[in-house]
Amino acid sequence: MKKQCILFVMLKLPILILTCLCMQGCRNISVETYMDKSLDDISCIAKRSNKPFCIVLVDSCQELSKEYSSYLHNDYKYLLNKSIYNFVNIRSLENEWYLKWLCPVSIPLTCVFSSNGKLIDLIPGAAKETFLYTQLALENRKITEYHWPNRFNISKTEVVSLLDSTLLHKNLLKQGVYIKSELQKISNSLHYPYTEYLQLMGELKENDTLQAQYVAKKMLKFESSYNLDLYKQEFVTAKRVIDPNFDIENEPTIEINKNLVYLYDCEVSKSVSFDIPIFNKGNKPLEIFAIHTSCSCLEQLNYMTKDKLFINRHDSIVLKFSFTANSSEEIYRDVFINSNAINIPIFHITVIANSKK
């Protein structure tokens, strides 16, 4: 009987140890890092623990975002004791608002917050400096000098303060509070669609139709391929405020039959031509603002003018391109067509070229 008991303990001991380790591991993960928690939820966790928190904007399809997570959990895991981490996948619909709020130039982006939810710093990338400056921001509870490239053309210190105020007013609007004068000041400094949209929501809450239409018209001045891509629903809302009969089906709509172009039997230094037909399926003129290629080896030939290119309703044009291979290996190049299309304002086409065997 005694032997059976010893044998039972010996068999069960590894399982007990493994169970304890798993429980410990799960406990550490749940305390230290989260994935796609809402800002409200992570703020509550931070307040309860009286710890600052970092929201890291990542792209689930990007290698650098995966590297960030690996570095944090290995080389810089000591940061997990200094802060609560919440990884936010920007490809999730519920997280789109972060992009609209911050307009980041690059991903990953670490947003450092105090325990009471004040934005302290914005730190880009996944380099050694990223983690060292994050440590400084967490320890000193203030903005660092680490450069954050931004679209606002003002200093990082000003931008972070204004973005923090923007977030505050976004949350106030959720509670039904609209402080018009303060939000207007922020909007006058940042000059981007998101603050205009928040003002628009405020005016609609106040039932001030005339002022709402005024703000909506101001917002539409920011309409560009990039902004239309990022703020599509917000622009649609603005257009409906201006014109209650607005119908999205009437808007210019781009259609290109393929987003992949394969070029076979290419020879180094010899040009190959190909066409890309573009259709406007909408009821308003389609404006092509710009056609960008990722390499000088890929040229657009027949529309070289810097003026806007118009395609009438239910009409089409053909873009002609020339590609010159600079290597005998398989080559990937990109074409970006920027327009006022409501469906795909920035149309991306990948060109894949294979050399002659």
Image: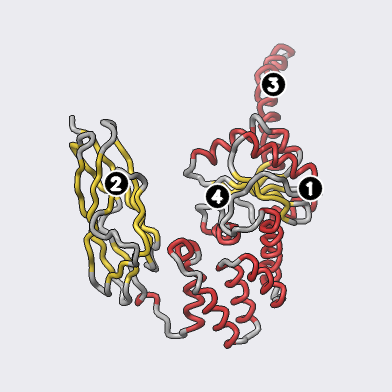
Earlier sequence position, callout 1 versus callout 3: 3
Q: Amino acid at mark 3?
A: Leu
Looking at the picture, tell me which residue is in the foreground, 211 or 343. 211
Q: Amino acid at mark 2?
A: Leu
> Helix or strand or loop: what does disc 1 sit on?
loop
- Residue at the disc numbered 2: 298
Looking at the picture, tell me which residue is in the foreground, 111 or 218. 218
Q: Position of residue 287 (x, y in %)?
A: 34, 69
Residue 141's disc is 1
Which residue is pictured at 18% across the width and 36% down the height?
265
Q: Position of residue 156 (x, y in %)?
A: 67, 53
Of badges 1 and 3, nearer the viewer stands 1
Of badges 2 and 3, nearer the viewer stands 2
Q: CA distance from mark 4 to mark 1?
A: 25 Å
Residue 158's disc is none
Q: CA distance from mark 4 to mark 2?
A: 33 Å
- Mark 1 surroundings within 10 Å by alpha-carbon count, few (fewer than 14), some (14 through 19), many (20 or more): some
> Helix or strand or loop: what does disc 3 sit on?
helix
- Mark 3 surroundings within 10 Å by alpha-carbon count, few (fewer than 14), some (14 through 19), many (20 or more): few
Which residue is pictured at 40% across the width and 63% down the height?
345
Earlier sequence position, callout 1 versus callout 2: 1
Residue 89's disc is 4
Q: Amino acid at mark 1?
A: Arg
- Mark 2 surroundings within 10 Å by alpha-carbon count, few (fewer than 14), some (14 through 19), many (20 or more): many
Earlier sequence position, callout 4 versus callout 1: 4
Which residue is pictured at 66% across the width and 42% down the height?
33
> Helix or strand or loop: what does disc 4 sit on?
strand
Of badges 4 and 1, nearer the viewer stands 1
